[in-house]
Amino acid sequence: MIYDHLLVRYGELTLKGANRKTFVSQLRSNVKRALMPLKGYEVKANRDRMYIELDEQADIDEMISRISKVYGVHSISPVLKIEKTMDAMYEHARIFANEYQPGESFKIEVKRSDKQFEYETFAIQRMVGGAILKHNDAIHVNVRQPDHEIKIEVRLDAVYMYDKVIPAIGGLPVGTGGKTLLMLSGGIDSPVAGMEVMSRGVTIEAIHFHSPPFTSEKAKEKVIELTRIMAERVGTIKLHIVPFTEVQKQVHKVVHERYTMTSTRRMMMRIADKVVHQIGADAIVNGENLGQVASQTLKSMYAINAVTSTPVLRPLLSLDKEEIINKAKALGTFETSIQPFEDCCTIFTPKNPVTEPQFDKVIKYESGFDFEPLIDEAVKNIETLIIDKNYRLHDDKQNEWDDDLF
Ligand code: ATP
Ligand code: MG
């Protein structure tokens, strides 16, 4: 391995002052969490960038793959940290150039933030380029379209040399933007909706409505796996599984068949609203999309939304299915989402659900029964799992983030 550090660049550089401090310290702990339990590194972050010092135990490819999924990381470069002398630059630039094939071209690009350094940018470029050519005359310089580019940063503390910039996911570090509750079904949309809000720095906990025996253990496992994939970006996510069978059965007893879908969704929302307050979150997130399926109309959203004054975020509202699928593929949830396990709603879906529910009818049907005790019972019996990226399930007692590890 020729590299001895990973250079991690932050996105959204406009953040200033105290915000920036919070941003950096959250990002540092998210990166550390993403790297656990790998060995062979030490993370050091300052206000501009993060350096991860590597030793011989470090699995650099695995580290890059994990860090590139952490929101708030803009790009990563494996770098060599070297002494601030021209000789050290010559020596190490040659190590890079040794890998090039005869006939290939290269370019040296220098950034000199230490203005006291004895040589200027262009001089350094020329001198290092010359040193390489002296050693290897089968390659040549091409500044317009080089096959390889060696970047040299002359900074106050040292010189950093690298040849790759690997793009990462960007966004803001999760944990800097408050907390939401994601309504997570086993479908394609809701995990993507969750990641959209996570990418803006928001922490999520997930809630899933499960109706055994109408929905199987496999359907629950699928949701656990989707949560695990999302946790790759943050380390750990809490998943609240709501026993929903009794509520759903009761809806089907008292509500007109064509309105059962609307009322079922309203009951989900009532339960989610209670959980939002229990966990100290400030919004609910779902995967609804305008017009994607017949039930996702404005009238339907109005009826469902009317049970709560908590903001309901719908990050996928206006996206095409195609775009959502592409995002699901990029995030790694698509293959799991398309596994054919029944959802609690598909089982009970009426043949001909109303697409434009009339609000007064919804209220009339539901008034035939007091759902509140059933809802409270469901909330009381929620099973909460803490799922980490390695699929370890923790019980709720050891629930808080292991921040003292860092
Ligand atoms: P998804 O692909 O996320 O299931 P969808 O297009 O199938 O979305 P619906 O089934 O109409 O849409 O559900 C709309 C939203 O309601 C979902 O995106 C999800 O946020 C929420 N939802 C539906 N079923 C459940 C469930 N069993 N548990 C938790 N949330 C659910
Ligand atoms: Mg669905």
Image (spheres, grey):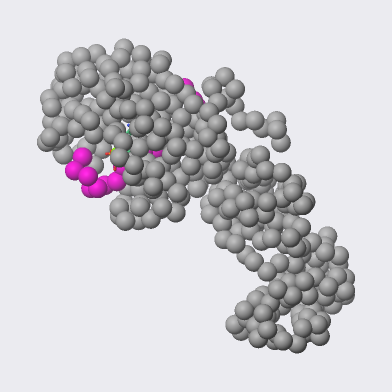
Q: Give the camera-side residue of 127 and 365.
A: 127
* Residue 77 coordinates in the image, percent (x, y): 66, 61
Does residue 78 appear in this view?
Answer: yes
Q: Residue at x 62, y 79 (%)?
A: 147
Task: Identify the image quadrant of the C terminus.
Answer: top right
Residue stretch in magenta: 278-295
Q: Residue at x 71, y 44 (%)?
A: 39
Q: Is residue 96 left or right of residue 156?
A: left
* Residue 47 coordinates in the image, percent (x, y): 71, 52
Q: Is residue 226 left or right of residue 138?
A: left
Q: Is residue 79 left or right of residue 323?
A: right
* Residue 200 coordinates in the image, percent (x, y): 50, 47
Q: Give the camera-side residue of 213 and 67.
A: 213
Q: Give the camera-side residue of 19 and 76.
A: 76
Q: Quadrant of residue 389?
A: top right
Let me know if residue 209 is in the magenta part.
no
